[in-house]
Image (tube, rainbow, N blue to C red):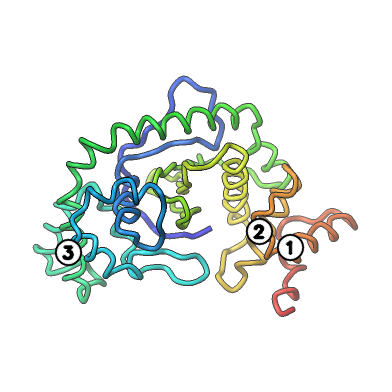
Amino acid sequence: MIQYNRQETSRIGILKGMNMGKIQCVYDKDNNFFFHLMSVAKVGYDNAYGEKYRYSMAPEDTATLKKYEKELTMKGGEYNGKLFWTGMYAGSAEEAIRKIRSAGGFPGFESDTGALLEIFGIFLKYHDDYCEKIWPSEELRLAKAAQEWQSKFDEERLEEKAEKLVGIDSERIFFASLIGSIEHGVEAILYETEDGNIYDLFSADRDYNSARVMFLHEYIITLLEKRIPFSIEAYNRFEGLAEYYTEELIGKTYNFTYQDKYIEFYRLKMSEKSYTSEELFELARDLETT
């Protein structure tokens, strides 16, 4: 789980006519455009998608994005790129440039004005080309994955089972937002928006079993956050608790083996007596120092 604030959302492709629960598979053009550029320029990761479309960006523009790689990359547990938020303007770069020029820079990022103008300039340069030549086929691929995964998830109703197991209900929708170009890159980038719901970014290059593990784990994270304040210091203890509940529902996932000591601890405690999620989390405090 990685969190950042996002105040704007772009138009989202949501499946119609399906009996969807609180976890809904969606996709949107602007997020996919941003990560398209990151993949093509090999900013933070490399994959077959980027190789396929590398021809579409001029070498000098690739070099510009690569120059700001650390600032544009989010790596869980290592660093959060201070300019990663620029992705929210991937589809409205002209507006962002106008804001900078009229106000003398983005508040709090005045020292990065030059970098922002370069980055937004690349967004603006390639946006129409992406929309016309790349997005139509990418949208078909994303819609196919979203429909298949949504249908299977709705049959299982795992979010309802998760709420019952954890003992926490959610009144919000969890939008699993699919990205076609982040294989080998960072996922589970969770953010809240002004509509009051939750969005989380996931790679579309998965099979359903892999997707359901990621969706369910992240959904449980959002439930736990209602009772347990998240802190980076307790990251493994928190993630381990979410994975414990995930494995109780669908079996061993092997996604978080480095947190096995927490998962095994929670399982042992629950075999002794029933604890709330808050109680389990507190009981595992001493494990952080071992």
Q: Secondary structure at mark 3?
A: helix
Q: Which residue is mark 2?
A: 256
Mark 3 or 2, nearer chain start: 3
Q: Nearer the viewer, residue 114 or 163?
A: 114
The residue that appears at 46% across and 57% down in the rendered structure is 186
Mark 1 or 3, nearer chain start: 3
On the rendered structure, is 118 left or right of 40?
left
Q: Which residue is mark 3?
A: 118
Vertical comparison of 101 with 207: above or below: below
Q: Secondary structure at mark 2?
A: loop
Q: Which residue is mark 1?
A: 260
Within the image, what quadrant is residue 86 found in? bottom left
What is the CA distance from the residue labelled 3 to the residue labelled 2?
38 Å
The residue that appears at 14% across and 63% down in the rendered structure is 100
Q: Secondary structure at mark 1?
A: helix
Q: Nearer the viewer, residue 110 or 29?
A: 29
What is the CA distance from the residue labelled 1 to the residue labelled 2?
7 Å
Q: Are marks 1 and 2 in contact (CB under 8 Å)?
A: yes
Vertical comparison of 4 with 90: above or below: below
